[in-house]
Amino acid sequence: MPDSPAGASSATRPPRLVALDAFRGITVAAMLLVNDPGSWGHMFHPLEHAAWNGWTPTDLIFPFFLFIVGITTQLSMDARRAHGVSDAVLVRQILRRSALIAGIGLLISWFPFFTWDSIAGVADPSLLQRIADRPLHVRIPGILQRIGVVYCAVALIALRTPIRTQIAIAGGILLSYWAVLTLIPVPGAGVPGRVVFDYPASTLAAWVDRELLDWSAFGWGNHIWAETRTWDPEGPLSTIPAVATAILGLITGQWLAGRRPLADRVAGMLAVGAIVAMVGCIWGWVFPINKNLWTSSFVLLTGGLAAMALGVCVWLIDGLGIRRWATPFVVFGVNPLIAFAGSEAAARLIYSVVTVPTAAGRAPLASAVYRSLYLPWLEPRVASLAFAISFVLVWLGVLTLLYRRRIFLKV
């Protein structure tokens, strides 16, 4: 938060909002919970993504985080300018930080830097063959990669534009994306996108993914999401409306940094958030709410819900002072990069790379633990959830240790 000018009264000075760290921590902890079940085949429906159109609570996690990226970008920009940092220095910092975030995401996708399972056409691959094969299968898009790109775009927008221009940019992105995805004929299909919208591999976004990320024809591998190989949920085209999600956070950050009483700021977030979410639902009647495509209706729905959820957190934590419940989430929220990158690397190891002997043969470590420690005494879905909760608690322990030693990873 920017410092108050000399002479400002404590009554008008906006306090530091602990709720921002708590809300970010909630999204990070929730991301670990849904990404690390004991069994992907046994999950409660709210902990799964919607198959295509529609949404579940899980589909709110990533847009909520990008919304927070927008808010913290605005507050950080204000603070740095208040300390006399020039725009030229800020631009260099923005480019450096976005490159580091995206680069860490690519390293996590590449990890453990060798192919751990079989290689097509090679009966007994050597370590060098495994190392050489791995880059051919690295997924280029990803969560951190999208965060890096979105942060860069929204930070430059915050640096150069006033709030009215930011609203216009967000509106222009959402309307343009709707037109592009529904009205432009999809190459190879010969029909407007709205006709093939319900077929994931046939959308214009999927076509762009394949054109930019599938290099198999050149012998350089397919770098799209391994679950489909034909489209990517964090693909290039759908990253553009994700910028609008962060712009909504940018606008909210300016509202939060205002001098109005906290109750007025919270009321504004709740009221405007409800309206924006309602508009998203209405738009969803003609442009379906879809997380994988990050449709314009999805942006408005999730942005409105994020504003309302954050408003509740701000009122409880910073308004009423009810903070004890939020402490574990603050621990996650002040070290989100370590929490996400570390947990993703750990998940890659225990779900894929590290195997152990079992009665049915060798199995991934996560599967063996789930089947031996949780499944014998719990119903499969409950056992799967218990494993995921245990994973979150392990990382809470790691992050608590770092928190108490004041170790925070900043880029």
Image (tube, rainbow, N blue to C red):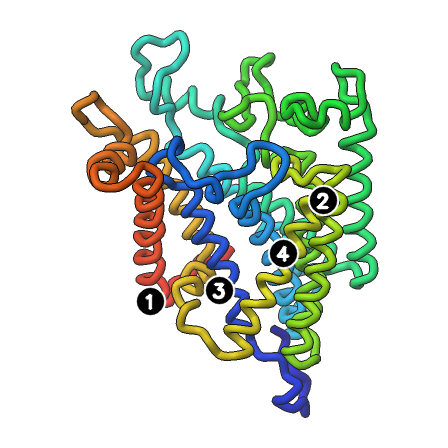
Disc 4: CA contacts within 10 A as few (<14), some (14-19) or many (>=20): many
Q: Is residue 201 left or right of residue 125?
A: right
Query: Is 380 above or below relative to 257?
Result: above
Disc 1: CA contacts within 10 A as few (<14), some (14-19) or many (>=20): few
| Mark 4 secondary-structure assignment | helix
Residue 243 in percent (x, y) is at 69, 47
| Mark 3 secondary-structure assignment | helix
| Depth check, front residue: 202 or 70 | 202
| Depth check, front residue: 4 or 219 | 4
Q: Mark 1 or 4, which is nearer the eye?
A: 4
Q: Which mark is residue 405?
A: 1
Q: CA distance from mark 2 to mark 3?
A: 27 Å
**What residue is rendered at 64% in x and 61% in y?**
307
**What residue is rendered at 51% in x and 45% in y?**
58
Instruction: Specify whether residue 84 is in view.
Output: no
Which residue matches tag 4? 305
